[in-house]
Amino acid sequence: MQNEEVQELVSTDYKYGFVTNVEVDEAPKGLSEDIVRFISKKKNEPEWMLDSRLKAYRHWLTMKEPTWAMVDYPTINYQDIIYYSAPKKKPTLQSLDEVDPEILKTYEKLGISLDEQKKLSGVAVDAVFDSVSVATTFSEELSKHGIIFCSISEAIQKHPELVQQYFGSVVPYTDNYFATLNAAVFTDGTFCYIPKGVHCPMELSTYFRINAVNTGQFERTLIIADDDSYVSYLEGCSAPQRSESQLHAAVVELVAHTNATIKYSTIQNWYSGDKDGKGGIYNFVTKRGICKGNNSKISWNQVETGAAITWKYPSCILKGDNSIGEFYSVAVTTNHQQADTGTKMIHLGKNTRSTIVSKGISGVFGKNTYRGLVRISPNATNARNFTQCDSLLLGDKCSANTFPVLEVDNPTAITEHEATTSKIGEDKIFYLTSRGITKENAISMIVNGFAKQVFNNLPMEFAVEAERLMEISLEGSVG
Amino acid sequence: MSNLLEIKNLHAEVEGKQILKGLNLTINKGEIHAIMGPNGSGKSTLSYVLMGHPSYEVTEGEILFNGENIVEMETDERAALGLFLAFQYPHQISGVTLFNFMRSSLNSLEKKRTGIDPQKDKKLSSKSVLQFSKKLSAKMKELGIDESFQKRYVNEGFSGGEKKRAEILQMAMLEPTLAILDETDSGLDIDALKIVSDGVNRLASPERSALVITHYQRLLNYIKPDFVHVLWNGKIILSGGPTLALDLEDKGYDWVKEEYSERIAA
Amino acid sequence: MKQETLLKENIITREQIEERSRLNNEPEWMLSKRLRSWMIYEESLEAKKERIDFSNINFEEFIFSEKRKNDSSFNVENLFSHKEARSGIVVSVDGKKKQEFLSDELRAKGIIVSDLHSAMQTHPQLVEKYFMNDCVQINDGKHVSLHSAMWDSGMFVYVPKNVNVTLPIQSHYILKETNTIFFPHLLVVVEQGSSLTFIDTVASNDEGNDVVVSGVTELFVGEGARLNFVALQEFGENVVYRNFKRAMMKKDSMLTWIEVALGGKISQENVEVYLEDSGIKAEIVGIYFTEKEQKMSFDTLQKHIAPHGYSNLLFKGVLTDKSQTSFEGMIRVHKGAQKTDAYQKNQNILLSLGARADALPELEIEADDVRCTHGATTAPINKEDLFYLMSRGLTHKEATYLLTLGFFSEAVDKISVEDIREEVMKFIMNQLEEVK
């Protein structure tokens, strides 16, 4: 296989890179206490929320941007970012009909027509456009089950007691540079509460899109599954093509109580920059869940094909006895993309179990790093962890790194870590092409096979989309 | 005739799931019993419970071996009494040679039975090494196992048939009074099956008994049982002579299911 | 540990280094190397925070503390009664050469086995060529810089081109003095087409005050050469040990490196292999057994610079009591090191509540046509294996003992020298007897 061919295959253009022309309501560029107050005021927030933001902002001023990740990017000028940008039309909508048609078209282009979703697939969608949540479907239907599914801004207004109880309880405002920044300037996001004993009847979904120029997106998601409940949540992301890089610093907190299960799936397809590495989203995300009660379970599933820089470690704190943490990830880095991603599994309770399956695919100049921590604390009797991280290399200028840490402090625990790095198998390509399959399809098939274990763990609709996305990232004309 | 093993109203569970639900079985000295049954009926559980696997818990009932209740005993103490289990899936033990393994076993059994550690007595030790080595070689020859296997790690890289033969070799070395064979026939071709059966038959004596657990009748052409039992839903629902096995082969388990549905459900 | 206040004059000075060099009658280049190292040491920042914490041990303080003689009962005579013959033996006590033996045949073939100070006089060009130039460098970390400024004793082993040394050569480095610091340096050079088995044993008794050892080991394996290197560490409970070890390998050479760490209070070793040219094969095996409050850490590096290299690293450890270990292993494949085949495995068994094992198996891959795998496991003795053995009559303790020996044998079997293999196995067996 010629390297040039592979490179061509893996360096096709971004297909979600359109811009939507919508009138926007923006904050001036830059960050200050006034801007924090401005955002809070725009959202008509109660005093406690503003205080929480200001506390975070003041703390952020004392912090330094972390440098330990294996990613290189030019210094971010935090004063050159617009921290609030909203479509002019008010986000308080009675029905989907009131959503700006331009936005609706956007979602259609993305393949997630809200209308269609509503009719056909039975997936409840919350859509976040730049800084605000524009529409939530199925809220009514869900409320029959006592499920709260709305934007976080709405939750702050309508369910302050829940927000106050859980907000920042998993990712405290002091956690890390980007999480602290988020706590100060987060604009919107999704809130979800599943009451005791409720098995959420449909997949819940949020689609995030950055549209306006120079905006940063700082969404905040909080999902609480009360005792004996179940929820599967899907998250999708995209952004238009722009020559400047844009910052995305989200925080996601999950809380699973006794016997509850949260499945969190992400398809991240932010704009990754052009072939020369110009533009693209800087994706610095803090995602963490706590298995608070016994027998609870949190499952992170992610397909990361976009963003210029990804810095993200969805983690599980396994506090309840017999609780389970999972992390299934596919990360594709082509062109000049860089991903430093992985997970942390903190075993505190007895008989806690965790599984990590990470698949990294690097092509062209892509740089893919797995970074993980498995910590078995002294009380985590009979804890088990299995980790597998594999890397596939598609070019001779890309790189793959694996940095796992295993800390075992209990003699009854069993931890296993396996990792391999290898080139895409020439023999396999040969075998497939000898059966008449084009090289392009052969590569796509092999890569899909490599990632299958993770795809299998995604909800149906997402699995199809994930495979299509992978094909798009790898597709192209063979010269 | 004195009985060797008496199982009374045995209930046992694994990971909180009840598998054996009131099993009764008596085996006298010198007898060969076969236990048959469909998959999931509790056959392997019975063998593990008899040998004292730590994951299996006896919740009710007794297992009397020579009149002594062994339910609370450690696995190795049961081995010292003369119980032996030929595993359905023998474990690979990396780094431990078959020679060293068998020698450690015999030493440990002797220490338990006589109170004398043969390894502590230099004279005794060197003499016993020689004897042991001779015996091991002879038994391996009988079972058609290449002598090079002595130096190989236990079951590591052994084929399915080799593993089963190695199990029978261990049985031949330890000379148990009750040998439990858990699906020893599975995955064996006819030649291997004959060798394995010969090994079991060679051990037969008026003092020794065997409990043969199998899914198929085939093995019982080579090891002739005195009694055949059908295990279903954690209980023995049917017992008979050697012909019962042939009936089962003939009519299949569905026949038992129709005929004895009440006993199964009970 | 004694925490005496550091007196103002207890600071290394230029004069002291010059004095040390002068007393040894060292050539000018060595003095200047020492001084450069000292400057680097002085300028270097605090060593990075390590998983096994050395921060409460002040290495400099030991340089100025008053040595204590220890009437250690270590019997040096025993060291000559090897089951397998040696073609050379060197015994040093407290860094001073006590006995030396090299077969006349090897001497005639130009093999050098000498203490480093003498070698500097007798073979100045060779020592200057190899001593801390291409292999370990004076700026390889703070501890290495201090070592190269202050090194006090050492060994030089040199096998010229196309000489096969069939029987092993062994060095015994014995410590009796306490309350002090030693800086031993080992330099082994196997030239093109030659072969050598070298055993480096370091040992001391358990008695007395703390003693610190900060060593550097440099191994050169020339084109097509073969080196079999066995390092056996059996220090007493009072020893704080560091050693920075690196092997430089040339085209088509082969290395088998066995690292056995059994003693010491705190130890940290760097085990690095540089595959500088094509066709190299390196096998690295680590064996460790810790007890009480022992702390051990290993930082390993398999550095693939050239294509068609093979390296396979296996570190196995058993931890008892409240002991702690850390394994940080890296496979680094540089651009252009195509067709690299690299493996790395770390396995730990924790036998006691309170023991802790950390594993950081890392990969950094910049070439695409490679096959790299690593794995790490930490687990108790497998329950099913225990049941299997106990069903054959072994007690729980006997079964654990046998399974633990079995766990090590994969690694121990790679030691080619029979009596060393037995010595290691015996040590492990004795330790295991003590485990509850």
Image: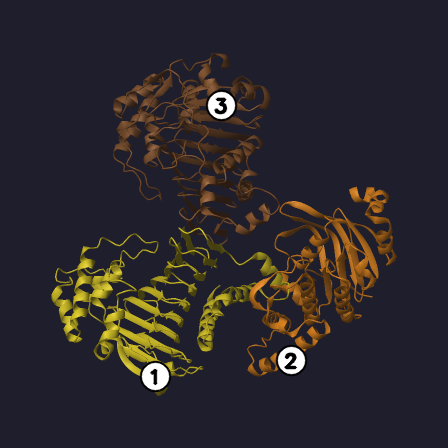
Chain colours: A brown, B orange, C yellow
Q: Which residue is disc 1 drawn over?
A: C109
Disc 2 target residue:
B131
Q: Is residue A304 above or below residue C198?
A: above
Of residues B88 and C194, the one drawn nearer to the viewer in this rendering: C194
Give the residue type at disc 3: Lys
Mark 3 burial class by Cα count in 10 Å: few <14, some 14-19, many 20+: few
Which chain is mark 2 on?
B
x, y percent for residue C299: 36, 58
The residue mark sitting in front, 3 or 2, is 3
- Horizontal arrangement in the rendering, residue C111 relative to residue A258 (left or right): left
State if disc 3 and disc 1 touch (CB < 8 Å): no
- Foreground residue, B8 or C333? C333
Marker disc for residue C419 = none
Residue at x-position 76% and y-position 70%: B203
Separation of marks 1 and 2 at Cα, in angstroms? 50 Å
**Mark pair 1, 3: CA separation:** 81 Å
Disc 2 marks a residue whose amino acid type is: Gln
* Type of the residue with mark 1: Lys
Q: Residue A181 location, x and y as percent?
A: 32, 31
User: What residue is shown with label 3?
Assistant: A109
